[in-house]
Amino acid sequence: MRLGPLERRVLELMWERHGGARVRDLQPSFPDIAYTTLMTTLDRLHRKGYLDRMADGRAFAYRPRVTRAEAVLSSFAEEVGALDAHTLEELEQ
């Protein structure tokens, strides 16, 4: 699953934080993004398997499920998987 620019920015911030975060914790780092847009982005990252989500009162807290290296490897594998068989053979050689 490809990540959009905002999804990548959110993931980078989550990796830097080294812990869980709620939408309101992240909002100051995204002053140009609406609260609901940030909330939707976190939910999408959760559904894509990049973030874990835990109930935190009436809100959710999120934390990275994958490391930065795992995310990069996953993206690379996805891109390679989209190549045709001939290109894959060339890469193997």
Image: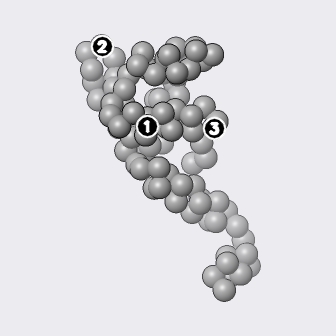
Q: Toward which corner of the image does residue 53 lie, by quadrant?
A: top left
Q: Position of residue 47 (x, y in %)?
A: 45, 38
Task: Identify the residue at image location x=61%, y=46%.
Answer: 2
The nearer-to-camera label among 3 and 1 is 1
**Label 2: few (<14), some or many (≥20) within 10 Å?**
few
Tell me: 40 left or right of 88.
left
Q: Is residue 93 above or below residue 9?
A: below
Q: Is residue 46 above or below residue 40?
A: below
Q: Position of residue 59 (x, y in %)?
A: 33, 17
**Label 3: few (<14), some or many (≥20) within 10 Å?**
few
Q: In this view, does 48 lie above or below 17?
A: below
Q: Residue 16 carries which label?
A: 1
Q: Toward which corner of the image does residue 90 lie, by quadrant?
A: bottom right
Specify the amino acid type for callout 3.
Gly
Query: In the image shown, does 84 or 14 lie closer to the viewer?
Result: 14
Q: In this view, does 57 lie above or below 40?
A: above
**Label 1: few (<14), some or many (≥20) within 10 Å?**
few
Label 3 close to label 2 by CB (< 8 Å): no
Task: Identify the residue at image location x=33%, y=30%.
Answer: 20
Query: In the image shown, does 11 or 16 lie closer to the viewer?
Result: 16
Which comes sooner in the sequence, label 3 or label 2?
3
Residue corresponding to mark 3: 4
Residue corresponding to mark 2: 58
